[in-house]
Image (tube, rainbow, N blue to C red):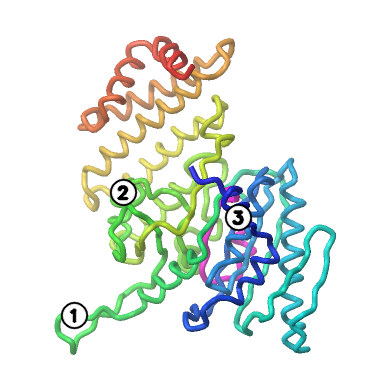
Amino acid sequence: MVNANEVGNSATLNIENAISDENNVNSGNKPFTGLVSVIIPVFNAGDAIRACVESVVKQTYKDIQIILVDDGSTDSSGRICDELSEAINRQHSNHQSKRQSGDCNAKEHSNEYQISNSDEVLDDDQKISITVIHKDNKGVSAARNTGLKAAEGDWITFIDADDIVKDDYLEKLVSAVNAFKTPISSKDPAITEHRTYPLMMVTMTDRIAPDTDMSGYYYIEHGVLNEDSHVWGKLYNKEEVDACLGTDWFPVGLSIGEDMLMLLEMAAKMENKKIFRSIPAGSYVYTENEQGAMLKPYKPSYLDQITCWDRAEEVLEPCKGHISDYVYVRLAEVQIMAALLVAGKIAISPKEDNYSNEINIIKRAIKHALKRNGAFASLSSGYKIKTIIFRLSPKLYLNMYSRWKE
């Protein structure tokens, strides 16, 4: 997998050089005006947050508000966020001063960074600011909701602190917004069709054909339940999503699946309205964090794997008759896989711990999902075998899984 730090190091980036490089953008490709707020929840990401922020600063789209929400980090993340904020905001303050004085050669020094300016300054319509919010640890949902309250942009995007984005990430997303506003021409050149509803979200995905305008029901089937269930790699119309979900978009209390539920609820409420648009993937660089929660042994919050898909079933229940039966079969399939994932975490955990309650929860989840006609048949051969073994003997399954992982 791509490592965000390696990308940042190989390019020998630092924050000041990234800001100076803004001046090299081809002025012939002037981006849309309008502020985009970039919300980055940060928790113990001291090794990665610099590269993440640098990648945002180097965007070809320039009207950006970066919001770093330090969610009670216990490492150096909070300090680094403050340093980045000071360096970036001072750099842009210097650019403003040089515009007024005409001095393009001034240099300043901070305790840790050398501000390195190029011979050109930012255009008057270019603006990048950074806000840092420090809060007690309440989880990623609460951190994102906090960032939303500080967002000043009409459009919102989320980036995980250990990921990076390519230089054209925001420009591609915003360009899709502009394209959606263009009337659709029919075969008759005298007739054009104007879209009825404002665009709510652009998703950067390889799961849906590019430039597809989608209804909520379509996005549920071809997006959320087709592995486009993450909150990053998307651009959101803040006013429209606020009207749909309220100002707190994400369900607090879940550590897993909160982004999927947010997308699912939004799509379900929008029903047949074509207000989602897809564009090609490729500008968001996801980093597999080998120290991340998904690769660690069991802890109680891992039951959220099961809980989130139970809640998803509740959200989808009113959609029956509007979406295909396949969606519900796919949901049951995912519920089984999620339950077995939790079982796998238990299998690699200390044997002296008692997980009888968790085992019963897993058994009930699998039994419930298998009641859906077609659920078992839809599983891959590997998951069919896993399901059979676990139902016959959870203890045997855990022992076999543990030995396999060794």
Q: Nearer the viewer, residue 343 or 160?
A: 160
Identify the residue at horizontal 48%, vertical 83% (top origin): 28
| Residue that carries the numbered disc 1 in the rendered image | 186
Identified by mark 2, the residue type is Pro
CB-based contact (under 8 Å), mark 1 and mark 3? no
Residue 386 appears in view: yes
Q: How many residues crowd around disc 3 within 10 Å: few (fewer than 14), some, or many (20 or more)?
A: many
Q: Is residue 191 above or below residue 233?
A: below
Q: Is residue 242 magenta?
A: no
State the residue lying farthest toward the left.
188
Horizontal and vertical percent position of residue 317:
31, 44
Gap in Å between the C-alphas at discs 1 and 3?
Answer: 43 Å
Residue range in magenta is 144-162
Q: Is residue 1 above or below residue 20?
A: above
Q: Nearer the viewer, residue 229 or 173?
A: 173
| Residue that carries the numbered disc 2 in the rendered image | 318
| Residue that carries the numbered disc 3 in the rendered image | 52
Q: Nearer the viewer, residue 387 or 110?
A: 110
Identify the residue at horizontal 72%, vertical 79% (top origin): 95
Identified by mark 3, the residue type is Cys
Q: Is residue 148 magenta?
A: yes
Identified by mark 1, the residue type is Ser
Q: Could you tell me which secondary element the residue under label 3 belongs to?
A: helix
CB-based contact (under 8 Å), mark 2 and mark 1? no
Q: Nearer the viewer, residue 354 or 122?
A: 122
Q: Earlier in the sequence, mark 2 or mark 3?
A: 3
Q: How many residues crowd around disc 2 within 10 Å: few (fewer than 14), some, or many (20 or more)?
A: few
Q: Is residue 290 above or below residue 166?
A: above
Count of numbered labels shown in the rendering: 3
Horizontal and vertical percent position of residue 250:
52, 51
